[in-house]
Image (cartoon, rainbow, N blue to C red):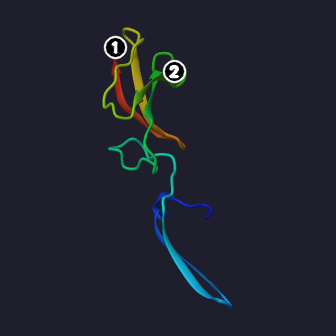
Amino acid sequence: MRQTERGDTGKYTLKAQNENGTDSATCNVTVIDKPSHPKAREDDGGVPLENYLVEKFDTATHSRWVPALKVPARQAAANVDGLLEGHEYKFRVSAVNSEGESGSIRDIFSGSR
C-alpha cells in the first residue's frame, strides 16, 4: 500500500476470488513512521523511540540551531553543558526513532545562564 499514514494501522481482511473459488485472510497491519512531536509521547511512530535530540540557539549570536545533546528515550530530564554566562538561549526538542526525526517543539524552553 502506498501513501499510508499511522491512522491506517489496523485489522484488514483480504479476499481473493477466481473460477476455482473464494478465499479470505485477516491480518493486522502496523504502519510505522517518524514519531510525532515529543509532546507527552502522543505517537512513537509505531516503533520504539531511540532518543530525543536537544538543539540550542544562542540569541546573542543569532547564528543557527546547534545540536546540544542526545537524550535516551527513557530519560525525562537533561543538562546542557557549554552555555556562556550572560547569554540567552532557546532550545528545541525532537523525538527520534528508526524511521527518522519528528518535527521539533520549538522554543519551549528558554532562559539565561
Q: Toward the viewer: 2 or 105?
A: 2
Question: Which amino acid, by three-letter code, is at mark 1?
Answer: Arg
Q: Position of residue 33 (x, y in %)?
A: 52, 50
Q: Disc 2 versus disc 1: distance between alpha carbons?
A: 16 Å
Mark 2 packing: few (<14 Cα in 10 Å), some, or many (20+)? few
Q: Is residue 21 left or right of residue 44?
A: right
Of the 4 image quadrants, the one containing the N terminus is bottom right
Residue furthest right as drawn: 19
Q: Position of residue 67 (x, y in %)?
A: 50, 24
Mark 1 packing: few (<14 Cα in 10 Å), some, or many (20+)? few
The tag on residue 113 is 1
Please, is residue 33 above or below residue 92 in the view? Answer: below
Q: Earlier in the sequence, mark 2 or mark 1?
A: 2
Question: Which amino acid, by three-letter code, is at mark 2?
Answer: His
Q: Residue at left 39%, top 30%?
A: 72
Q: Secondary structure at mark 2?
A: loop
Q: Which residue is mark 2?
A: 62
Please, is residue 76 above or below residue 30 in the view? Answer: above
Task: Please state which of the two labelled residues, at mark 2 or mark 1, is closer to the viewer.
Answer: 1
